[in-house]
Amino acid sequence: MVGRPSQEPPPGVDRTMPAANPFATPGARSGYGRYEFNDFENDIIKRTAKRALVWGIIAMALGGINVIAGCLAFMHPVLLANLCSGVASMVVGASFVRAGRSLTNVVTTQGEDLRHMMEALDKVGSALVVQMVTTVIGFLLAAAAVTVAVMHVRLP
């Protein structure tokens, strides 16, 4: 029938394991079926892992540069803003490095691909939340800084 999901498990999934316990800790061994990603799937996961790692390293490096610039705030107070954005970039970068390492575990291990993939997806989700929160906070702080700067210029 068109439009109805198949009741058959995907190829490679062993459904002889008990059904997932909704109260089990995420990543608990008993909740996942047995599936090993094939070479094509592993290539996609590996590519994504490398991208997450590279982005994490770039974000941490740029964050480090901003932190160093922020430490020079004694020369000019405006540089203090770099300290905040630098720390935020480093936190975002570290989150993406952790996600990339978890994705790498999916490709480099045998027998626990679903558990590793779920852990990796959880870390990718966390990294995205960290990036969203730091972006919104950064935008609000920048808007506040612009407002203060405009008010300062208008005052005699």
Image: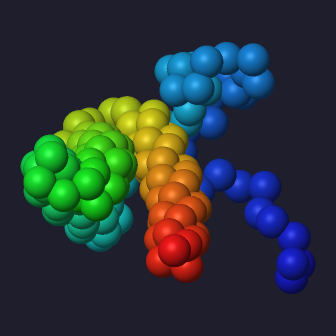
* Vertical position of residue 142 compared to residue 89: above or below: below
Q: Nearer the viewer, residue 11 or 40?
A: 40
**How many numbered dots are placed on residues in this image?**
0
Looking at the image, which residue sits at the far front? Answer: 156
Residue 23 in which image quadrant: top right
* Vertical position of residue 42 compared to residue 116: above or below: below
Residue 18 in which image quadrant: top right
- The residue sitting at 78% across, 55% down in the picture is 7
Q: Nearer the viewer, residue 44 or 39?
A: 44
Looking at the image, which residue sits at the far bottom? Answer: 2
Residue 2 in which image quadrant: bottom right
* Vertical position of residue 78 compared to residue 92: above or below: below
Task: Left or right? Give the position of 82 relative to 113.
Answer: left
Task: Left or right? Give the position of 144 relative to 149.
Answer: right
Colour treatment of the image: rainbow
Q: Position of residue 62 (x, y in %)?
A: 17, 60
- The residue sitting at 53% across, 65% down in the picture is 148
- The residue sitting at 56% across, 32% down in the picture is 32
Locate the N terminus and report the quarter of the image it occupies: bottom right
Q: Position of residue 87 (x, y in %)?
A: 29, 45
Q: Position of residue 135 (x, y in %)?
A: 49, 61
- The residue sitting at 61% across, 18% down in the picture is 25
* Vertical position of residue 145 compared to residue 156: above or below: above
Q: Look at the image and tell me whether residue 39 can be seen.
A: no
Q: Nearer the viewer, residue 51 or 86?
A: 86
Q: Look at the image and tell me whether residue 23 can be seen.
A: yes
Q: Position of residue 117 (x, y in %)?
A: 43, 44
